[in-house]
Amino acid sequence: MLYLPAHTTVTINQSLLAPGYTATWIDPVSGAKTSAATGATYNSTAKGTNSQGDPDWVLVFQGTQAPAAPAVQYLYSMRRFR
């Protein structure tokens, strides 16, 4: 997550993010979300101003989640065979 307090351009190292990640712009005043095209460069200037007329934005990166491990089922199976 990045907080951009003024219009700016940021470059990220995409190799550090999970394949299939998403990027979302969030208006820090209203909480409104807008999908961002994934890439190495993000420009908050293109977003303009937020709902309060200020230039600050939040950029959130989210990776795909792996399925949860079946820990509960595993523990149940172990107890059954004791």
Image: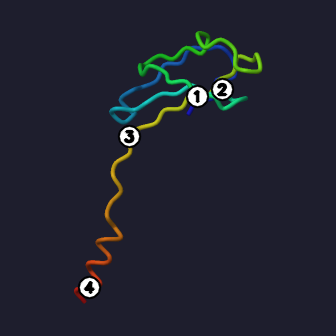
Residue at 32% of width from left, 76% of height from top?
75
- The first of marks 2 and 3 along the sequence is 2
- The first of marks 1 and 2 along the sequence is 2
Please give the label number shown on residue 49.
none
Please give the label number shown on residue 64.
3
Using the image, determine if residue 17 lies above or below residue 72: above
Residue at 66% of width from left, 26% of height from top?
27
- The first of marks 4 and 2 along the sequence is 2
| Contact, mark 1 vs mark 2 (Cβ under 8 Å) | yes
| Contact, mark 4 vs mark 2 (Cβ under 8 Å) | no
CA gap, disc 2 to disc 3?
Answer: 23 Å
CA gap, disc 3 to disc 1?
Answer: 18 Å
Using the image, determine if residue 70 lies above or below residue 32: below
Residue at 38% of width from left, 45% of height from top?
65
Percent position of residue 82, x then y:
25, 89
Percent position of residue 20, x then y:
35, 32
Which quarter of the rendering shows the N terminus? Answer: top right
Relative placement, left or right, of 67 versus 47 is left
- The first of marks 1 and 4 along the sequence is 1
Image quadrant assignment for residue 34:
top right
SS at badge 1 = strand
SS at badge 4 = helix
Percent position of residue 25, x then y:
57, 25
Question: What residue is disc 2 on?
Answer: 27
Question: What residue is disc 1 on?
Answer: 33
